[in-house]
Image (cartoon, grey):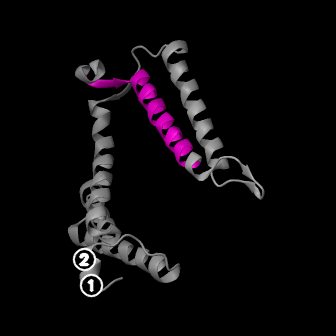
Amino acid sequence: MADLQKGYVSRKTMEVVTTLLTGGAGIAICTASWRSGVGWSDTGPEAGYFPFIVGSLVILGSMVTFLRSLFFYNHEGEIFLDIERAKPVFGFFLPVVAFILISLLLGLYVGTALYILGSMKWQGGYRWWISGCAGLAVSALFYLVFEVGFQVPLLKGPIEGWLGIY
């Protein structure tokens, strides 16, 4: 937190946060694998056996990196991210968050079209009609590939229902 007050995030802080996140992902993998069974049955390994090993390796790697970051490497004064470098990161990250939220509320095709439109318009500087056409074309392509070609239904919202796409 002291780093944020100074206007930057240090490398050591980011390494610790990253190890905590990856360690949490490893714990989630191991927990879910444990529910599926991590032992051997008469037919071989149970469903959670290999994911449990992968989750354990993720936890082990996170712990090693965490300890190295805290005790063995001196990254004092190394800046990972400052305000100026954070602006392009947020310029990418915030539209992705908006894409996820819109996709959950309105469906993946609408989210994709709006994400392509917004990214091309605000980050690429393209004209509205070119960005809109590209967004609609990518969504239509996704529909043809996944729904028609592979027959894999993707997340849909109320707009697809109004259009009769189900």
- The residue depicted at 34 percent of the width and 25 percent of the height is 9
Residue lying furthest front in this view? 42
With respect to residue 70, does 99 lie above or below? below
* Residue 147 percent coordinates (x, y): 45, 79
- The residue depicted at 59 percent of the width and 31 percent of the height is 61
How packed mark 2 is, by other alpha carbons closer than 10 Å (few <14, some 14-19, many 20 or more), is few
Judging depth in this view, the residue of 50 and 149 nearest the camera is 50
With respect to residue 4, does 149 lie above or below? below
- State left or right for residue 100 relative to residue 78: left
How packed mark 1 is, by other alpha carbons closer than 10 Å (few <14, some 14-19, many 20 or more), is few
What is the span of residues highlighted in magenta in the rendered image?
7-33
Q: What amino acid type should be assigned to the residue bearing mark 2?
A: Ile
- The dominant secondary structure in magenta is helix
Magenta stretch encompasses residue 95 = no
* Residue hosting label 2: 159
* Residue 13 percent coordinates (x, y): 39, 23
- Secondary structure of residue under mark 2: helix
- Secondary structure of residue under mark 1: helix
Q: Quadrant of the C terminus?
A: bottom left
With respect to residue 56, does 139 lie above or below? below
In the picture, the disc for residue 163 is 1
* Residue 58 percent coordinates (x, y): 58, 37
Q: Quadrant of the N terminus?
A: top left
- The residue depicted at 27 percent of the width and 24 percent of the height is 4
Cβ atoms under marks 1 and 2 closer than 8 Å: yes
Q: What amino acid type should be assigned to the residue bearing mark 1?
A: Leu
Judging depth in this view, the residue of 35 and 57 nearest the camera is 35
CA separation in Å, label 1 and label 2: 6 Å
